[in-house]
Amino acid sequence: MNNRSRTWDVAVIGGGAAGLSAAVTLARSRRSVIVVDAGRPRNAPAEGVHNFLTRDGISATELTAVGRDELTSYGGTVISGRAVAAQRTETGFTVDVADGQKVNARKLLVASGLTDTLPDIAGLRERWGRDVLHCPYCHGWEVRDQAIGVLGTGPGAVHQALMFRQLSDDVTLFLHTAPEPTEQQWEVLAARGISVIDGLVAGVLVDDDRMTGVRLGSGDSFACQALVVAPLFSAHSEVLESLELNPTEQRAGEALLGSVFAADPSGATQVPGVWVAGNVADMYAGVINSAAAGFTAAAAINASLLDEDVRRVVDETRTAPTAPDVFSAAAATLGARRHRFPTESKVRQ
């Protein structure tokens, strides 16, 4: 049976930590599950995944490969492609893939992640995931004791600088487009020995494939070996918006931080039968958080399927012929004595 004609128990959109974790959990519960994966993990530029117990330093590519192997060992399926839309059907949902494939499933889990939109600064994108980073827990240890710059783009800039000050004695906050620190923040920055540079950052300086500093719009240059930025986090929304779900903006005061899709603690959305997990629902989730969210969503999905399955079996039992009716029909057709069928009076009611 091909993917177009088959109806799976669950279709998972996205083959990262959240999607694969959910798929493995469902497959281990003997659910038929298919993962549609575009093959573009958000953390691919990074040298490795950290704070993932027993997998510290594993590359995003290897983590995905291991996860796929685990899934297929339990009977799950992965197909390559970018899911672009979904429609509700009588039996659940049909997912449209960009290459023309269609996937039918009773339930839908969207774990498609998000996009990091970086400030428009020359050379920044090329260094992303290497010496341009944003998460102290994911990649902070790797830049410990280096000269670290923090690019201020919002109200969280001072907090970012303080976080990275735990990792290095040499931290500089470039105010860039961040608001002016408050009097209390100035005091804290001074107490922690964090330098503050006013002015817009215009470019990243690189020598021999290593960051050496940043250049301001004024032409002045300042040395640093790593630069911390705060991207705009935008949840991948095509499939969910096709089901009339809209992303929710996340703000700190007037500053836009990003957008995600709202869900209950299990990942269930306002559309029955549709769940979300990972960065599409939580823009700050690390890889291990996303994997945990996938497990949680999978358990909820399995419970929903179980409820449907039990209801269907009960309904079928209620409408099936009763035992006396079956025996009576057989006896009338074949002869009760010759074929040793019990008569109606001997059938237990």
Image: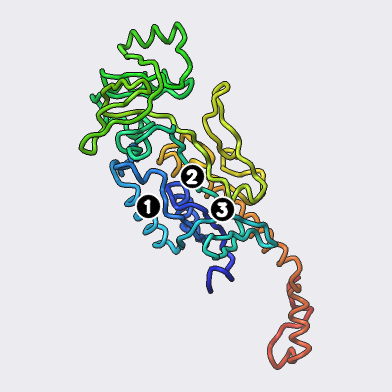
The answer to which of marks 3 and 1 sits earlier in the sequence is 1
Give whichever of 110, 228 is nearer the camera. Answer: 228
Q: Residue at x 76, y 70 (%)?
A: 349
Give whichever of 175, 269 is nearer the camera. Answer: 175
- Where residue 263 sits in the image (x, y, percent)? 60, 40
Q: Give the quadrant of residue 137.
A: top left
Could you classify mark 3 by the number of other residues whose Cα lies within 10 Å: few (under 14), some (14-19), or many (20 or more)?
A: many
The answer to which of marks 3 and 2 sits earlier in the sequence is 2
Q: Residue at x 57, y 51 (%)?
A: 301
| Helix, strand or loop under label 2 | loop
**Residue type at numbered disc 2:** Gly
Give whichever of 49, 347 is nearer the camera. Answer: 49
119 relative to 288, above or below: above
**Residue type at numbered disc 3:** Asn
Q: Are marks 3 and 2 in contact (CB under 8 Å)?
A: no
Give whichever of 240, 171 is nearer the camera. Answer: 171
Of the numbered discs in the image, which one, if any, rests on residue 113?
Answer: 2
Residue matched to label 1? 64
| Helix, strand or loop under label 1 | helix
Q: CA gap, disc 2 to disc 1? A: 14 Å
Could you classify mark 2 by the number of other residues whose Cα lies within 10 Å: few (under 14), some (14-19), or many (20 or more)?
A: many
Residue matched to label 3? 302
